[in-house]
Amino acid sequence: MTKSLLLAHDLGTSGNKATLYRLDGKLVDSVVYPYEATVLRNGWAQQNPEDWWRAVCAGTRHLMKGRASEDIAGISFGGQMMGCVCIDAEGRLLMDSIIWSDMRATGENRILEERFGFAHACTVTGLRPAPNYTLQKLMWIKANMPDIYERTWKALQAKDYMVYRMTGEAGTDVTDAAMTQALDINRLAWSGEIIEAAGIRPGIFPDLKKSASVAGGLRKEAAEEMGLIAGTPVITGAGDGLCATVGAGSVEPGVGHCCLGSSSWVSNCTLKKIDNADGVLMYNPHVVDDMYCLTGTMQAGGLSYKWAAENFYPGESYPALDGIAADAGAGANGVMFLPYLMGERAPWWDAQATGAFLGLGLHTSKEDLLRAVLEGVALNLALIFREIHKIEPVREINVIGGGAKGGIWPQMLADLFHVPVYKLASAESGTSFGAAVIAGVALGVYSDYTVAEELIEREEAFEPDEARHALYAEKLLAFEQAYLALKPVFGKL
């Protein structure tokens, strides 16, 4: 029987999205099984990896109803990054996973930065030091849960633990490894230098593999739980951000992408080696050999829209809100919004930054405020785009994520970035589609990653409007000046 389907899992923070694709890239079926995070106290966030496993198995069984398991050519994963799943030498879980958003290792991050140096960390790892990364989380576990640390055989990422459950093989790919802050970005090998500075034993990190590699065959026990055939190839996969990059067709320099999700980002590919000493952008390995990603992420992209919707227009649909914001007109009647509702990462890296409206007057309407929120997110993304464009020019942007469903945000981005922006038909399935492409490359179904550009479907094109670009160029300057002027005030609020 012909192997005609690729099974991709997008192991996110709120649930696992299991998706079936045909080998020609067409979506067959998809289902989401949710799970929760446990917030133990402010800044602490954990999840039980057993919940992930149950969601993966349940989603797979759901998709396989009425389908032949012999049709599955392979299983691949994209998964939440920057976590810490501790297992012992028998493969037993030692504690819940400390997930990407957890900030408990702030003190450990300060220690690492003092020992290793900020600029040196940026140059070696491609990342500015932060408490979210796995290395700092392991430092915290060592200091506060020494028994767990001593019993830990391997510290895995979310998708790597799923692959381990399926195959018995403990490994990771370079995209997930890079977001531990323990990878030498220049050698694509574990950095003994920064691991030693952290006081962590190097053997705790798993072997490195290519994203498009077969980790192993599906074990009999796992196959029975999932309703599949033992021996089905399981692909190493990649972190969700890099799967989304592939799923957005961003596999060559100049073809960038923007994700308009809860958090939002702009990214572009490059073959250039940079030192990234200022740490404004994240500089990580792409799944494509010898290629890197320049990425800037903001904290509250879609979250800002959600906040405005809930507070200004409770119960209103997003398509209706898009229409209201469009009617308000470019420039939001002179109102400006700083979208720093959760502090900010790129380009400012300022945890104390707060949201703010400026330009309010008696003439200001609720519609103006809504438009200003959308423009504020787009303006911050434009600052990120500017930093990326300096290093590797961007000639076009593919936009993905829930915020891409309407046309208003993609058009704002086109006007601000001054490049064509394309909304993809698979805007909300980019991560799982990228995981499927990685599986196809690993299995030899696709010759290389350029197939992603061929398989994606551009649903709508947005060309820059020169008049709006001129208006937004002035507003972008004011936006930047507003943040810099208010920066001394944020910490006093």
Image (spheres, rainbow, N blue to C red):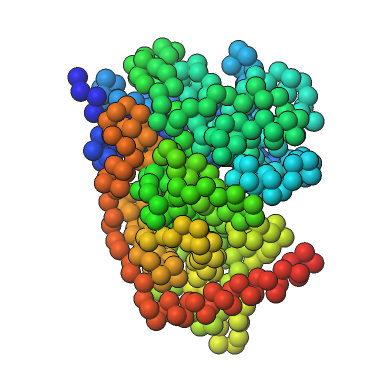
Near-viewer residue (313 or 266): 266
Farthest left residue? 1
Farthest bottom residue? 362
Near-viewer residue (438 or 251): 251
Give the quadrant of residue 121: top right
- The quarter of the picture where the C terminus appears is bottom right
Residue 352 image position (x, y, % from top left): 72, 60
Position above or below: 441 against 285? above
* 351 to the left or right of 404: right
Regarding residue 480, the answer to whether it shows in the image is yes
Residue at x 27%, y 51% (from the top left corner):
457
* 153 to the left or right of 23: right
Position above or below: 483 against 82? below
Residue at x 63%, y 14% (from the top left corner):
89
Position above or below: 336 against 300? below
Regarding residue 322, the answer to whether it shows in the image is no
- The quarter of the picture where the N terminus appears is top left
Give the quadrant of residue 257: bottom left
Give the quadrant of residue 139: top right
Near-viewer residue (355 or 14): 355
* 293 to the left or right of 99: left
Residue 198 image position (x, y, % from top left): 74, 34
